[in-house]
Amino acid sequence: MRFVVREFEETSTTGEVFSSIGIGVKENDYIVLPSPLSNFIKKEYRNKGKSINSQRNAAYSVTRFLNYLFENKNNYPELLSAGLSNLTLQHGADYISYLSLKSRVNELKSEYVKGEIQYINWFYHWLNTQNILSQALKVNYKTINYGGKSIAIKNNLFDTTDDLDIILPIRNTIQTNVIKDFGKNRNKLIVDFIGTAKTFEPLMALGIALQFFGGLRRSEVINLKLSSLRWTNNTLIVEVRDNQNKLFPNALNTADLQIKFPRDQFCICPEIIKPLYEGHLKLLNKLNKKSSEAIFISERNLEPLRGKAYSSKIDKIKQQFLNNLLEKNQMEDYFLLTSNKWSTHIGRGIFTNLLIDLGLTPTQIALARGDRSLKSALSYVDENTLISSMNLAINNFDILKED
């Protein structure tokens, strides 16, 4: 099966014959079935007076994206079971990353990839407005001046979330200088950042540690329940699951709550981790938290933290952390961390670099990160071997101890 583009003729109510572009599904060499996705081209391009070339370009972009997903269907069982209703931004991010990597080895031009991003972005907006997606997308707007008037336009969906694993083409206009690590002084800065959290937002320290030492995304952290963390032979295992219905039953917009890939996540466990875990439980008990199973809550109302609130608290910690660097005259670190953009997602990059320093193989790293290639990695690496590799190298982290 493949998605294809077809040009056909239509007749208007006045009898005028004109060309239109549609999307079809090619079942075999002889049969092409019309797809309701043609309505995307009709509504967003033809009905808005766009040329036949504009319609054709958009249709080909969408079919390339859909065929990419179908060709990699074994990586996306959720789409096989429920079709496009289970489509998320991460599926689009995977496709964009695939194109971007090809552009970085000169197989594609970056301008071509930028064009694909715009078409795919608009396709997601259309799916969202048609209520096709089971998880509604959060759409942000920015105001521009056009013809002396202020106009609100939709932001690019792939540039407005911290939780996407995405590679953008070089020199892309929507790409910013985003850093994915703390640099050569990483280990000390990790401890300092967590220490800053313990001082100013103590309920956030454990979450930060899980991002740094377990590679968890923001959405995965806020979906954790008290029962999601378990210890096995001094190894912390995090049960990453979709707990939206239990923790956020009344949420209307769930874009910041989506779990990409449920899994049991192994954490690197230097000496700093267990005291953070135990201290976090003491803080929760002190607050007499009984109304929710969530492990990360708002101290103000004891409700589970949403993504926006989580990021807001991280931003406060980040600002204090940067102020501390300035006061301690750590200018090299300060310039690195203020001249580039970074957010909670830096934890996943830091975790990856820690794994590299630990000497793990690429397949072990894929397993430890919970990447899409997890199943193939398991055929080469036993989980017990992974844990042993981590534990053997923990002695190299003497700096990761509390003062």
Image (cartoon, helix red, strand yellow):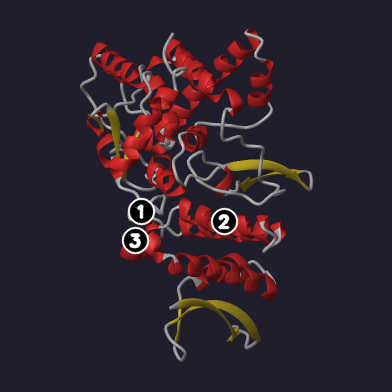
Quarter residue 104 falls in: bottom right
315 versus 113 height, above or below: above
Q: Indicate which disc residue 380 carries.
A: 1
Q: Which residue in the rendered view is the most extreme toward the bottom?
A: 30
In the rendered image, which residue does mark 3 sit on? 77
Measure the alpha-carbon separation of dots 2 and 3.
19 Å
Which amino acid type is marked by label 1? Tyr
Q: Which residue was labeled with disc 2?
A: 96
Q: Looking at the picture, tell me which residue is in the foreground, 103 or 243.
A: 103
Residue 254 lies, with reference to residue 329, above or below; the image says below
Local SS, label 3: helix
Q: Secondary structure at mark 1?
A: loop
270 over 219 or under it: above or below = above
The image shows residue 14 at horizontal and vertical percentages of: 63, 85
- Among the two numbered marks 1 and 3 on one chain, the one whose residue lies closer to the N terminus: 3
Residue type at mark 3: give it.
Pro
